[in-house]
Amino acid sequence: MTRIHDMGGRFGDGPVQPEGEDEPIFHEEWHRRALAVTLATGSLGQWNLDMSRHARESLAVPDYATFSYYEKWIGAVADLLVDNGVLTRADLAGEDSPADGAAHPLAGRALTKDKVAGVLSRGGPTTRESNVAPLFEPGQAVRALRPAANRLVDGGHTRMPSYVAGARGRILMAHGAHVLPDSNAHGLGEAPEPLYAVIFPAGELWAAPENPDDEVVLDLWQSYLEPA
Amino acid sequence: MPHDHHSHDDAHPHALLPSDPALRVKALETILTRKGLIDPAALDEIIDTYENKIGPKNGADVVARAWSDAGFRKALLEDATAVVRDLGYYGRQGEHVVVVENTPETHNMVVCTLCSCYPWSLLGIPPAWYKSDAYRARAVREPRKVLADFGVTLPEGTAVRVWDSTAEMRYLVLPMRPEGTESMPVEQLAALVTRDSMIGTGLAKAPA
């Protein structure tokens, strides 16, 4: 099994509450700041995107269930800052330390206003050269491994949702080789390997699909799959 | 096999900050600013970018061009990343783009069940409902009931294809072009393209 964030297919969540197209994107001032603090601290280069997703998923189950969206973000950023040695627990607790007057060793890496546009427009592509040969091609039948789990680190980060574990589908698209989150989230290297869009009939995934013609497509790495 | 350290961690460090979320963000921002690790002017610039510069109008421009120009549409469906790059819509959370086309046979709908992956460079920051537990949990299992929450009913014979954004590929739906728009220029067409129609929880607007 994975973690509480893995909620695809879950029952009991009630209706979706649509919002008008003109609703403001941020509903509270602190939402703006939470997003900006998250992006700005990310650019210090002390963790990668997979590590930051894993930090959110690693919030305690009651916190994940009750924190609002940006509360999860800011909680995870605080945890990442301490876990990666950027800040100390004393810093977060507001206890002044003797070093407070001295420059932080990472201060030179702080994202400045003039760099923002470039950083955001460059993004962080995840395609890589890889020596892992593609095993599958579009049209081929495959099965998602069961259970859905990180196979490098027990209890670690994976991008395979539980609902697809063991299901049979077929390769729809080959996306080339991408960084493997199961490795990259744990500092074990990018380990790029082929990534595929895999299409599953709804009847493979759900006991009572709404319509037998409906389908779900997931992007799955080669090591999540076996021939079927 | 190594174990994930998070599975038997001490109390999470974030608990040392104030528990009220607004105060928590403020406290962290203050600490980081004092240490020179963030620049408040850079934060303002990030916010301005996503509040005022990058939003659904980028995606609407792409859709309107695809409706108007068969060559553009073909190139977009073959390699959307290259096409949006040429238009200046490449960027963070839009590094690998796939455009999927709605037809009378297939209605496409996008979700991220594991977190909130969304094509930022084309649609901006996702709306709250896209990030909600209800949408993440239900869109893959009962997309038609979710569409009903949005007031959308599909014609008989249209299959739903839900795209769960589990990797860094970002999916944009190319909605069907409304009838009665044959002579419309790109700018007017773009005004018919709603954000929700590009996520797949809505349809493009009919012309007035």
Image (cartoon, coloured by chain):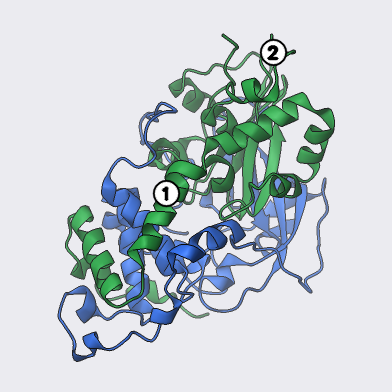
Chain colours: A blue, B green
Q: Is residue A197 above or below residue B25?
A: above
**Measured from the top left, where is residue B26 in percent x and y?**
23, 60
* Residue A198 as seen in the image, left or right of residue B154: right
**Measured from the top left, where is residue B67 in percent x and y?**
73, 25
Could you say which disc has been placed on residue B16 in the image?
A: none
Q: Residue at x 76, y 70 (%)?
A: A129
Q: Is residue A93 above or below residue B122?
A: below
Of residues B69 and A225, the one nearer the viewer is B69
* Residue B12 as seen in the image, left or right of residue B57: left
Query: Of helix, strand and loop, which one carries label 1?
Result: helix
Task: Give the amino acid type for the residue marked by disc 2 in the picture.
Answer: Thr
**Measured from the top left, where is residue B115 in percent x and y?**
46, 51
| Mark 1, residue position | B48
Q: Residue at x 50, y 46 (%)?
A: B113
Q: Quadrant of residue A27?
A: top left
Q: Label 1, label 2: how many angstroms apart (C-alpha)? A: 34 Å
Of residues B174 and B64, the one nearer the viewer is B64
**Measured from the top left, where is residue B38 in percent x and y?**
36, 69
Indicate which label's residue lies in the foreground, 1 or 2.
1
Query: Of helix, strand and loop, which one carries label 2?
Result: loop
Chain containing mark 2: B
Q: How many marks?
A: 2
Chain containing mark 1: B
Is the Cβ of the residue at disc 1 closer than 8 Å to that at disc 2? no
| Mark 2, residue position | B181
Q: Is residue A36 above or below residue A204?
A: below
